[in-house]
Amino acid sequence: KAGVTQTPRYLIKTRGQQVTLSCSPISGHRSVSWYQQTPGQGLQFLFEYFSETQRNKGNFPGRFSGRQFSNSRSEMNVSTLELGDSALYLCASSLGGGANGNTIYFGEGSWLTVV
Amino acid sequence: QKEVEQNSGPLSVPEGAIASLNCTYSDRGSQSFFWYRQYSGKSPELIMFIYSNGDKEDGRFTAQLNKASQYVSLLIRDSQPSDSATYLCAVIRNNAGNMLTFGGGTRLMVKP
């Protein structure tokens, strides 16, 4: 059974540019969440999508956005990149529902460096 | 007060010993509790989750949950050098979908 697939794995962008990251969840999983991990702030929740609807949103500026497609694949976009956006971006996949017993798996992540 | 707190460590244990990792949380409405292991430069790997009071065992790992005291712990028996990593505690609060709130992680070092 394939795991959570994130692309691209590594990328370098320039300040002011925008970036799109992609996540394919485990087959059958309908919930996709995105997290940002930095050495200073740790793992922080960005947003969660379930059945193409944003269900939860973290405390990030509007430059961070996402969407989910009918096949549960998800993309996140960061516009007007800042140096502080350099981080590991992680996608998490779950069956959904939020009920007890949902296992949540992470992809390998996308390493973004902003220069 | 942080929502999920962990001692950053490092916690150093000798090979073969029991490593005990602790986590406290502030929201009494938290429902599900997860432990992840993260090696340097890698993504978090799910070890186990628990949502009922008591113990849950999986191989060398035992998660313990005490909702009254608002803490969850992870015991690693027969610790191996390959267990050296950062262990992340995460909780899902009530009505929060699958939104994980993470602690800062505890760095574990298992010495041969």
Image: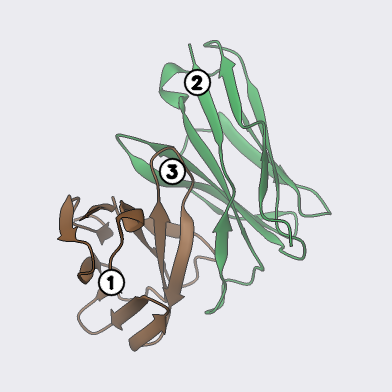
Q: Nearer the viewer, residue B102 or B61?
A: B61
- What's under tag 2, amino acid-wise? Thr
Percent from the top left, x then y, of residue A107? 59, 48
Q: What number of labels is visible?
A: 3
Percent from the top left, x then y, of residue B6? 22, 58
Q: Chain of mark 1?
A: B
Q: Is residue A26 above or below residue A41?
A: below
- What's under tag 3, amino acid-wise? Asn
Q: Which chain is brown?
A: B
In terms of secondary structure, where does tag 1 sit? Answer: loop
Instruction: Return the residue at label 2.
Output: A113
Q: Which chain is green?
A: A
The residue depicted at 42 percent of the width and 76 percent of the height is B31
The residue most toward the right is A70
Mark closer to the chain start, 2 or 3: 3
- What's under tag 1, amino acid-wise? Asp
Q: Is residue B80 above or below residue B52?
A: above
Instruction: Return the residue at label 3.
Output: A59
Q: Nearer the viewer, residue B108 or B4?
A: B108
The residue depicted at 48 percent of the width and 35 percent of the height is A88
Q: Is B31 placed left or right of A46 in the picture?
A: left
Q: Residues within 10 Å of mark 1 (few under 14, many from 20)?
A: some
Q: Residues within 10 Å of mark 3 (few under 14, many from 20)?
A: few
Nearest to viewer (mark 2 / mark 3): 2
Gap in angstroms between the C-alphas marked 3 and 1: 40 Å
Q: Chain of mark 3?
A: A
Instruction: Return the residue at label 1.
Output: B78
Q: Quadrant of residue A104?
A: bottom right
Q: Residues within 10 Å of mark 2 (few under 14, many from 20)?
A: some
